[in-house]
């Protein structure tokens, strides 16, 4: 029995220490980044935020909305092939990942879409990125698609980050168990505190000139700042983007002053009972559901939320004196805290 006794940290365990700087205002900072991807040497520039490939938030509507801010979306994998073909043939597809798992059916559907539409970014996504079969799938996808940007995950340690990059991934997705509607830690006892996972995986990836995407666990804009500070090149969000007009969750309305107004929307994990009943005809008897189904407040168009997130990141950069998002990890000093927020008003 080995116990690793180094303390591993989550977003809530740290704050970012302010630093002296000559920056005048948050308008002096640039929150866009340019990346050159490891395997195809192509460049991408934008705000490195990605909507999660969950069927409530990874929608075509979300992709159009986030793209206006230079941010990206991983479309969920349950759209019919024809809809995906039409989408990837349109002008809206520049900042969009096509998502898939590792089944033959997933690969066949992807080949059919790619034969008719230009897909240039792939998100190969499994709950557990530690299997040989997953690494082999990433390698095969790379071989078949030398020009495509491949994001693959999820893992939480440096060794698997390196293995996936060497197998053909450009971006490794990091996070096991931190998600807002994830119950993996509860059901299995498996997981890794997300801030430490990002720090360790980013270190491994950057040594090989690859990138990481911190996936899951962001609850407030400050958590994105911490993720970038820890070395995340991209940050993926599910729950923070739920409840908006661009989402495909069911709305609940209430009567107020004789009018029907939307007040809440469903949101659920992709391995929750809800998702498994919707797509797989029920929960297979050999596996437990590892996702929750919740209701989140209805929040209108996603613009307000994106602007709030971008404003938070800009402001963080002025506090630590970083003019470019790229400089943030270098200028970040985390302080460990016992409590990070004043909760007197909830
Ligand atoms: P959030 O931003 O909501 O905290 O986390 C989003 C991430 O949670 C997703 O990108 C995905 O990695 C993860 N996730 C989504 N659905 C499920 C689920 O049903 N079970 C688990 N374990 N993780 C999920």
Image (cartoon, rainbow, N blue to C red):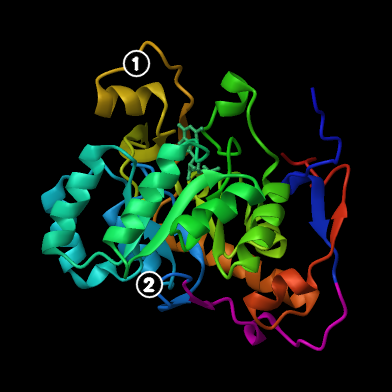
Q: Residue drawn 46% across and 72% down?
A: 37
Local SS, label 1: loop
Whether 28 is among the magenta residues is yes
Within 10 Å of disc 1 (Cα), the crowding (few <14, some 14-19, many 20+) is: few
The x and y percentages for residue 154 are 51, 44
Numbered mark located on residue 254 in the image: none
Q: Which residues are magenta?
A: 19-37
Reply above or below: 205 against 243: below
Q: Residue drawn 82% across and 29% down?
A: 3
Looking at the rendered structure, the number of numbered marks drawn on it comes to 2
Local SS, label 2: loop
Between the residue at mark 2 and the residue at mark 1, the CA separation in whole angstroms equals 40 Å
User: Residue 138, can we see it?
Assistant: yes
The x and y percentages for residue 194 are 67, 45
The x and y percentages for residue 51 are 43, 54
The x and y percentages for residue 124 are 38, 49
User: Which quadrant is home to the N terminus?
Assistant: top right
Q: Residue drawn 70% across and 58% down?
A: 226
Residue 192: name its quadrant.
top right
Residue 169: name its quadrant.
bottom left
Within 10 Å of disc 2 (Cα), the crowding (few <14, some 14-19, many 20+) is: few
Tell me which numbered mark, 2 or 1, is placed earlier along the sequence: 2
Q: Nearer the viewer, mark 2 or mark 1?
A: 1
Q: Report the front residue among 19 and 189.
A: 189
Reply above or below: 171 against 192: below
Compared across the picture, whether 329 is left or right of 170 comes to: right
**Dots 2 and 1: beta carbons under 8 Å?**
no
**Label 2 CB less than 8 angstroms from ligand 1:** no
Numbered mark located on residue 284 in the image: 1
Compared across the picture, whether 88 is left or right of 251 comes to: left
Q: Residue drawn 39% across and 53% down?
A: 139
Numbered mark located on residue 68 in the image: 2
């Amino acid at each position: 029995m080995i116990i690793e006794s180094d303390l591993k940290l989550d977003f809530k365990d740290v704050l970012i220490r302010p630093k002296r700087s000559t920056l005048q205002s948050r308008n002096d900072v640039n929150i866009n980044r340019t990346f050159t991807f490891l395997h195809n040497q192509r460049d991408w520039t934008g705000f490195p935020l990605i909507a999660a490939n969950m069927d409530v938030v990874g929608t075509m509507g979300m992709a159009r909305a986030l793209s206006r801010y230079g941010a990206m979306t991983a479309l969920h994998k349950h759209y019919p092939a024809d809809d995906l073909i039409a989408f990837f043939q349109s002008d809206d597809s520049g900042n969009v990942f096509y998502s898939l798992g590792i089944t033959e059916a997933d690969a066949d559907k992807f080949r059919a879409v790619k034969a008719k539409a230009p897909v240039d970014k792939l998100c190969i996504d499994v709950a557990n990125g530690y299997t040989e079969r997953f690494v082999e799938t990433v390698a095969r996808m790379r071989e078949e698609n030398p020009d495509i940007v491949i994001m693959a995950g999820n893992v939480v340690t440096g060794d698997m980050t390196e293995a996936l990059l060497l197998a053909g991934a450009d971006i490794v997705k990091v996070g096991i168990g931190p998600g807002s509607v994830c119950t993996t830690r509860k059901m299995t006892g498996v997981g890794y505190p997300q801030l430490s996972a990002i720090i360790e995986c980013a270190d491994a990836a950057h040594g090989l000139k690859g990138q990481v995407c911190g996936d899951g666990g962001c609850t407030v804009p400050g958590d994105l700042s911490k993720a970038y500070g820890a070395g995340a090149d991209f940050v993926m969000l599910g729950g923070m983007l739920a409840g908006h007009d661009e989402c495909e969750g069911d709305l609940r309305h209430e009567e107020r002053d004789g009018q029907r107004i939307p007040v809440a929307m469903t949101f659920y994990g992709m391995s929750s009972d809800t998702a498994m009943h919707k797509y797989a005809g029920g929960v297979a008897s050999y596996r437990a559901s590892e996702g929750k189904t919740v209701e989140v407040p209805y929040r209108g168009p996603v613009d307000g939320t994106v602007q709030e997130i971008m404003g938070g990141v800009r402001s963080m950069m002025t506090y630590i004196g970083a003019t470019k998002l790229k400089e943030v990890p270098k200028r970040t000093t985390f302080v460990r805290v016992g409590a990070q927020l004043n909760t007197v008003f909830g």
